[in-house]
Amino acid sequence: MKFEIKSRWNGSVLFSLETSSLKICLEAAAKSKANLFGANLFGANLSGANLSKADLLGADLFGADLSGANLSEANLSWANLFGANLSKANLLGANLGKTGLDPNKKPNGNWKRFKPLNKDWVIGYRTRETSGAGKILVDDRIYGVEVFSTLDTECHPGWYLWPSLEEAKSFSGEGEEFIKVKSRKKDIHKAGSKWRSQAIWVLGTVK
């Protein structure tokens, strides 16, 4: 089957390939260093795709599934990432300028559901194990993120936390080990029905 990657601006064909999926077509385009400026990838299933160093400047990735995708060193400047699933995606070294992951953009600071610890910090709850980072969070350590999303999309990079232990358990299930963390108010971003932070400080296990 022939797959075509078209421009979001004028519908022109940027790349085409006889293959079995759009994901493979896009991987081939990235590998060949094709010009994918403004590619229309709206809602595309790109889970696990290897798009390292892909030039996706201005691409429309609204609602695309990029979970587990390798986007290291990709050019995503001006790309539309709203609604895209970026869980476990590798964004190391990616150009994220003028996107919702732009490091110059600030969280919305919506911390009101959290219990204040003092004028700068709040208390939150989450699981000790984090599949995204593949690690067990250690007490009395601060964990930051290399990439943080300020979009109102739930499956985007950041440290997820909840205002109460009950909400954390309701989301993750009773079989997990839960911890208390603290976060600066200004680092918190509410997206949909979830909260994420640019950095958390692990305080210890809670029952």
Image (cartoon, helix red, strand yellow):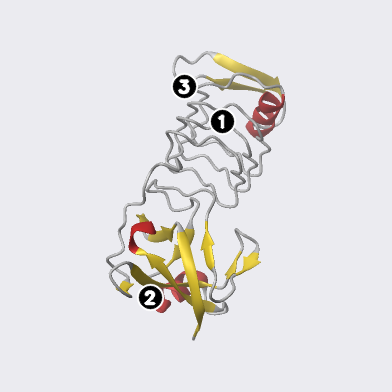
Tell me the SS state at disc 1.
Answer: loop
Q: Position of residue 95 (x, y in %)?
A: 54, 34
Mark 2–mark 1 CB contact (< 8 Å): no
Tell me the CA gap for discs 3 and 2: 43 Å
Q: Residue 3's mark?
A: none
Task: Tell me the kind of residue under disc 1.
Answer: Asn
Mark 3–mark 2 CB contact (< 8 Å): no
Q: Earlier in the sequence, mark 3 or mark 2?
A: 3
For the N terminus, the quadrant is top right
Task: Tell me the kind of residue under disc 2.
Answer: Ser
Tell me the CA gap for discs 2 and 1: 38 Å
The answer to whether residue 1 of the structure is visible from this angle is no
- Between residue 177 and residue 111, name the one nearer to us: 111
Question: Within 10 Å of the Cα at label 3, are there few (<14), some (14-19), or many (20+) other Cα atoms?
Answer: some
Residue at left offset 52%, top offset 77%: 178
Tell me the SS state at disc 2.
Answer: loop
Q: Earlier in the sequence, mark 3 or mark 1?
A: 3
Q: Residue 75's mark?
A: 1
Location of residue 30 (image quadrant): top right
**Which is closer to the viewer, label 2 or label 1?**
1
Residue 161 to residue 16: above or below: below
Residue that badge 3 annotates: 8
- Between residue 50 and residue 173, name the one nearer to us: 50
Q: Earlier in the sequence, mark 2 or mark 1?
A: 1
Tell me the SS state at disc 3.
Answer: loop
Residue at left offset 67%, top offset 22%: 33
Mark 3–mark 1 CB contact (< 8 Å): no
